[in-house]
Amino acid sequence: MRADDLELARRCREGDAAAFETLYRAHSGRLFGLLTRMTGSAHDAEDLLQDVFVHAHRKLASFRGESSLGTWLYRLAVNQCLDHLRGKQSRMARATASLDEDEAPEPAAPAPALPAPIARIDLERAIAQLPAGCRAAFVLHDVEGLDHREVGAALGISEGTSKSQVHKARMKLRVLLRGLGAVPRGALETV
């Protein structure tokens, strides 16, 4: 597999458009899902996915085959997304500074009126409502399967902070999903 990855990377570096298309088709679906869950927005995920592959094209010379090409791209996507979220948080902090000064109550987002059988859509929407830090930790840990040490390393936080963020995300999701009527009481208690 590594030999195939190295060969594909070599062909991409040499300007082989078909090789880059192969790379894109093999990994774009998984990366788009990750980016959508982390940003909470399909529109942002589309933009980020494009940025990830542009960045990958520029950085392919640095791919040494120490991990799979998929893992290397996954790491680029996580980093690109975290940069995006940090920038977005900074812009939001500046934009809402006047609200904080006025001590205005935080407006509540209206709960979408969806039928209960659409639980996956409810979950995606609830995840999108999580604060960025909790959402990133939750997606990386509970959805993508990274352990807390790996989540901490990916997000630049401690392992304990990762555990705290995931716990807070789960608590918030329970509240959000119950509010949507998507999950009966007690169904999420083991999460």
Image: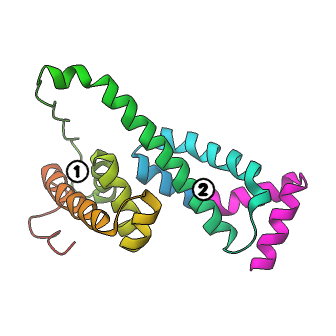
**Viewed as shown, does residue 28 lie left or right of 116?**
right
Label 2 – label 1 distance at C-alpha: 37 Å
Compare residues 178 and 128 and report the one nearer the observer: 128
Q: Nearer the viewer, mark 2 or mark 1?
A: 2
Asked if residue 123 is positioned above or below residue 72 in the image, the reply reads: above
The crowd level at tag 1 (other Cα within 10 Å; few <14, some 14-19, many 20+) is: few
Q: Identity of the amino acid at label 2?
A: Leu
Asked if residue 58 is positioned above or below residue 188 in the image, the reply reads: above
Query: Which image quadrant: the C terminus?
Result: bottom left
Q: Is residue 164 magenta?
A: no
Compare residues 116 and 43 and report the one nearer the observer: 43
The crowd level at tag 2 (other Cα within 10 Å; few <14, some 14-19, many 20+) is: some
Q: Position of residue 15 (x, y in %)?
A: 89, 51
* Residue 93 lies in quadrant: top left
Q: Is residue 6 magenta?
A: yes
**Viewed as shown, does residue 71 lie left or right of 18?**
left
> Residue at label 1?
115
Query: Which image quadrant: the N terminus?
Result: bottom right
Q: Position of residue 120 (x, y in %)?
A: 33, 58
Residue at 57% across / 61% down in the picture?
Answer: 75
Compare residues 73 and 179 and report the one nearer the observer: 73
Q: Position of residue 146 (x, y in %)?
A: 43, 72
Which numbered disc covers residue 54?
none
Asked if residue 131 is positioned above or below residue 89 in the image, the reply reads: below
Q: Position of residue 176 (x, y in %)?
A: 18, 51
The magenta span reads 1-29
> Residue at label 2?
76
Q: Is residue 76 visible?
A: yes
Q: How is the image coloured?
A: rainbow
